[in-house]
Image (cartoon, grey):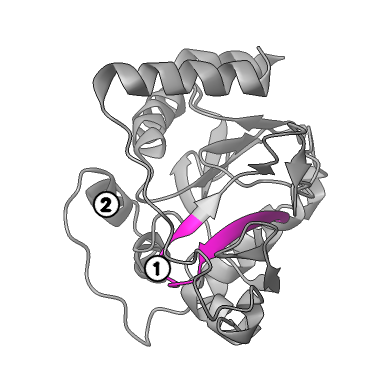
Amino acid sequence: MSFWKNLTTLFAATAAVATVAFAVPAFAMSEGCSGDCNSCHSITLQEANALLKEIGPVKEVKPAPVRGLYEVTFEQGGKAGVAYIDYGKKHIIAGQVFDIASRKPVGGSVQVKQERKERLDPATLTTDHALVLGNPNGKKKLFVFTDPECPYCSKAHVELKKLAALEPDLAIYIKLFPLKMHPKAYDKSRVILAQGSVELLDKSFTGQPLPAATEKDPKKPVDDTIRFAEANGINSTPTLVLPDGRIVVGYKDAAGMRELLTK
């Protein structure tokens, strides 16, 4: 189904449950307005970075093709994206902007995505800064990139414990990879790794509070994992890296992971 058909379907569904109201935009030209929005409204790269600091570094900011918006190009998870900030600097709009008449995208519609890798060189993986499940001396090694606040990681964690019981020669290395969408996950990862505690990870997954991060909980172990993941196209959790370097994204139960290990 095309974008425009999807859009029509969405509007129809919205109309069935709510009344959509359209207001005259606050930036509409009035008497005495030159029509040059840049003469009254501006935003610096520094301001844009401060606004989007939880999303990712902003590389460029400029007037959008739509009056009343700034267009920003930012990076997140190893890929570039485009979003829009309103003149009030209170809202962000993600996605493409389309010209109604031509039905073609305008502005920064092209997003440069990092190609997802299907495998990596296992020799580049390190067991440093990792929690261990199963047999620490196991000949088979499974790496898991996980976020302590990710609900899918929580489910996968239960299955990993089952897998460890099924595979006595398996060492499971858990690399904490906090996503920016979970702002508390970074400090939680610091605390968990500083203590090398699977129990603290268990508590996080069950919603129990963790000690607050302090200067004694280093950032480097977490930052190293983030850099490695982003450099290798890993941008979501949970992500498995099998002994032969295959990268498998998403939740798998114990049986499913065991099958992957045998292939």
Mark 1 element type: loop
Q: What residue is shown at x 30% (from left), y 16% (from top)?
A: 16
Q: Amino acid at mark 1?
A: Lys
Look at the image and tell me in which quarter the N terminus lies: top right
Above or below — where is 117 with respect to 10? below
Mark 2 element type: helix
Residue 198 covered by magenta stretch: no
Q: Which residue is mark 2?
A: 204
Report the predominant secondary structure element of the magenta stretch: strand
Indicate left or right for 89 with 115 as reference.
left
Q: Could you say where residue 64 lies in the image, as x and y percent from the top left?
A: 67, 62
Look at the image and tell me in which quarter the C terminus lies: top right
Q: Could you say where residue 252 lies in the image, as x and y percent from the top left?
A: 49, 22
- Residue 127 appears in the figure: no
Residue with the most extreme front position: 31
Above or below — where is 234 with respect to 209? above
Above or below — where is 235 with respect to 61? above
Q: Earlier in the sequence, mark 2 or mark 1?
A: 1
Q: What residue is shown at x 33% (from left), y 33% (from top)?
A: 20
The residue segment tinted magenta is 78-92
Residue 87 covered by magenta stretch: yes
Q: What residue is shown at x 58% (from left), y 38% (from top)?
A: 239
Q: Which residue is mark 1?
A: 90
Indicate left or right for 27 with 137 as reference.
left
